[in-house]
Amino acid sequence: MKELFFATAGIPLSTQPYDTLSGIKRVRELGLDAMELEFVHNVNIGKSLAPEVKKIAEKENIALTCHGSYFINLNSMEKDKKEASAKRVLDAARRAWDCGAYSMTFHAAFYQKMPPKEVFETVKKELKEIVSELKSEGNKIWVRPEATGKASQFGTVEELVALSKEVEQVLPCIDFSHLHARSNGKVNSFPEFSSVLSLVEKELGKKALKEMHCHVSGIEYTAKGERRHLNLKESDFNYVDLLKAFREFGCAGIVVCESPSIEGDALVLKKAFNGL
């Protein structure tokens, strides 16, 4: 991508009637450029509707991403749960691709008191199988494990970058608010945001910064990490410095706003970025 687009995490709240096709049109009316399909509870777009979603998105010039199921743990000790998790990733990736989305993200795993290196190898193995299946189907969607908001969850930036180096068709989805919460209030300044982007650029190349799919919101946290999302102005999250880092590194791709006021804060982000 050549530009940084700002997206709502799901259908804008002001959409009437409240459905995906109307949501895409509403995103354009709002002056935004992208929308994330939320498959967090289930794949809520039927196979027959997907081509229509793609058609409307292309007509309105709206880029699409997807957030997969919350119910995924590729490190589950139970074989059936691990297999179900992989299927949920595949189901979301397939339907998102049918809708014209270029990237899908998900929370990959929990450590479950296991050594992080062991969990990394398990997640890597599962992702290789998932990507292999997608590639065999001609599905080229970016598969993106997300940076997570609690220390109990697999998903540090270093882990995601390492996965991206070892598995084709995988890139990180960096949730900068999660990093802030996971670090109990750190990762909240221009130098810290720049350090994250510098790591991605050094290890994955400039292209990774031109194909970004990341998340931003206000956030409440405790010593254990993420508690809940907040609107930007109700949070201590330093989104202005993050936007300055995006500008400094020439980032392009999609920034998805996950604040409760999804379109309100997405517009705040876009206006602030354009004003830099």
Image (tube, rainbow, N blue to C red):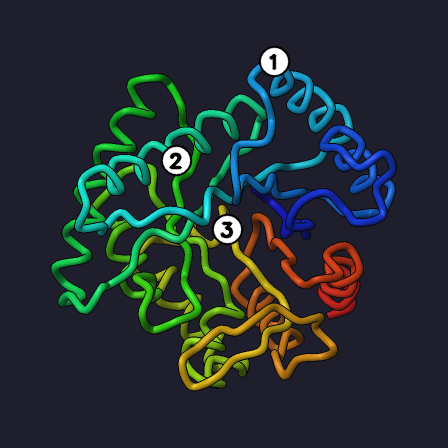
Q: Residue at x 81, y 34 (%)?
A: 25
Q: Is residue 9 above or below residue 81?
A: below
For label 3, the crowd category at 10 Å Cα-Cα, with few meaning under 14, some 14 to 19 and many 20 or more, is many
- Mark 3 highlights which residue? 212
- Mark 2 highlights which residue? 88
Dot 2 falls on a residue whose secondary structure is helix
Dot 3 falls on a residue whose secondary structure is strand
Of the pair 233 and 138, the residue shown nearer to us: 233
Give left or right: position of 240 versus 77.
Answer: right
Marks 2 and 3, the one that precedes in the sequence: 2
Residue farthest along the top direction in this orientation: 48
Dot 1 falls on a residue whose secondary structure is loop
Q: Is residue 5 above or below residue 238?
A: above
x, y percentage for residue 175? 49, 62
Distance from disc 3 to disc 1, alpha carbons, whole Å, reads 29 Å
Q: Amino acid at mark 2?
A: Arg
Give left or right: position of 33 versus 112.
Answer: right
- Mark 1 highlights which residue? 48
For label 1, the crowd category at 10 Å Cα-Cα, with few meaning under 14, some 14 to 19 and many 20 or more, is few
Q: Residue at x 59, y 31 (%)?
A: 44
Give left or right: position of 190 versus 195.
Answer: right
Q: Amino acid at mark 3?
A: Met
Q: Are marks 3 and 1 in contact (CB under 8 Å)?
A: no
Marks 3 and 1, the one that precedes in the sequence: 1
Q: Amino acid at mark 1?
A: Ser
